[in-house]
Amino acid sequence: MPTANDDHPARGRLAAAWASVDVRAAGDFWCTVEDRRPGLLPHRDAPLFFAALGRLMVGGDDPASRAALLLVLGRAYRHFGLLPHATTIGDALLATVARHARPVWTSQLALAAERALCRATHAVRRAAAQAGDGRAWWHVKVIGHEWPSPDIAILTVRPWRRLPFQPGQAVPVCTPRVPGHWRWLSPANAPRADGTVELHVRAVPAGSVSHRLVHEVRPGELLWLGPPGDTGLRLDPACTSDVLLVAGGTGLAPLRSLVEQVAAAPDGRRVTLVVGARSFTDLYDSVSLDKLQCAHDWLTIVPAFSEDPCAEPAEQGDALTIALDHHRPGQEIYLCGPPAMLAGARSRLLALGIPAARIHLPETL
């Protein structure tokens, strides 16, 4: 029986074969499915589905991105009623890839693809059992794209149908520039009357999706958003304790949405938001933060600069250290930021006697 290590070279060849498949293959895939099971998959959704399932078959995503991809596909299989027809869908995918990657397609590669697709289908079935009902994706149009810093973009998108998210959640995001690749982003706003969603994106090394969202996507382009997922950062509606929010980098986005949630229905709680950055020039969302601070007397915003000698003494230091200067007993504490900021944060807070139930860090999705 072949082992995972035995399959490794084959997976590399399969990835190369998949990369050679051009955009016309999605139409071929839909025609193949339609011939075998008419009406199974809507024509306009076939390219998105084909790219997602093919990407899952090939693999190579990090765990968070794989979770985003599985949530999208799990919902798609449920929404379109595809679970009883998974074999038909899989056979159509393999037949399409074989036709479009014919120069490199061999019997050994076909066998590796069948094994990989079998694993992917099992993963989708498990995901579908947990994905819940509802739409698998929302088509959105980029209506605003700002560069507050060289590696960060603020995108404003308008869904064709309202996205049913809650502050503190995250949504899978995909651009047609890199079809099949889904990445988690957290809306930076509470739900708005016009349905628009604001996304904060930092371009990271080797981040194919983030790089394109920051440096290439322009207003007027289309993106896709997947079903919202909980991250452990939602406010408990039954709790009205004061809140201490600690943000680093684009981890500000979900925490700013919590501030907007309180602003939409003030309930007497006081909110302190500590925003960490290396220096003042790295405080990328300062305009929105100033507007929030001026509009609400229950809100206190505190910058924390880790590498700015010109900052006020009370603002010099890492975000969590500065936040602890503002901590008061009974506060609910929410943290979101880069891994270096979150590493050890829980144990540090517990050592100070802060109850575990009051500490909220982003969960792995």
Image (tube, helix red, strand yellow):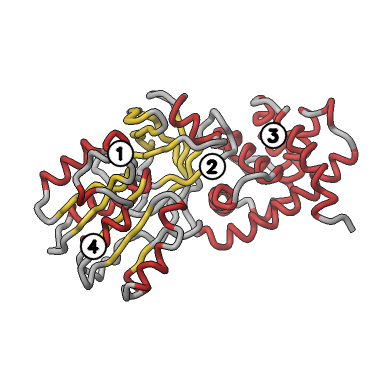
Q: Name the residue type under label 2.
A: Trp
Residue position marked by numbered label 4 in the rendering: 243
Tell me the distance, in whole angstroms, between the alpha carbons under discs 4 and 2: 32 Å
**275 or 225: nearer the eye?**
275
The reply to whether residue 255 is in sight is yes
Q: Looking at the image, tell me whether mark 2 or mark 3 is earlier in sequence order.
A: 3
Q: Is residue 21 left or right of residue 167?
A: right
Tell me the distance, in whole angstroms, between the alpha carbons under discs 1 and 4: 25 Å
Where 303 falls versus 27 (above or below)? below
Residue position marked by numbered label 1 in the rendering: 279
Pinpoint residue 156: horizontal percent, then vertical percent: 33, 34
Q: Is residue 202 left or right of residue 58?
A: left
Q: Looking at the image, tell me whether mark 3 or mark 4 is earlier in sequence order.
A: 3
Q: Name the residue type under label 1.
A: Ser
**140 or 151: nearer the eye?**
151
Q: Looking at the image, tell me whether mark 1 or mark 4 is earlier in sequence order.
A: 4
Residue position marked by numbered label 3 in the rendering: 29
Q: Looking at the image, tell me whether mark 4 or mark 2 is earlier in sequence order.
A: 2
Residue position marked by numbered label 2 in the rendering: 182
Q: Looking at the image, tell me whether mark 3 or mark 1 is earlier in sequence order.
A: 3
Tell me the distance, in whole angstroms, between the alpha carbons under discs 3 and 4: 51 Å
Q: Are marks 1 and 4 in contact (CB under 8 Å)?
A: no
Within 10 Å of the Cα at label 2, are there few (<14), some (14-19), or many (20+) other Cα atoms?
A: many
Residue under the image location 41 percent in, 35 percent down: 140
Q: Are marks 4 and 2 in contact (CB under 8 Å)?
A: no
Tell me the distance, in whole angstroms, between the alpha carbons under discs 1 and 2: 31 Å
- Quarter of the image holding residue 29? top right
- Quarter of the image holding residue 50? top right
Q: Secondary structure at mark 1?
A: loop
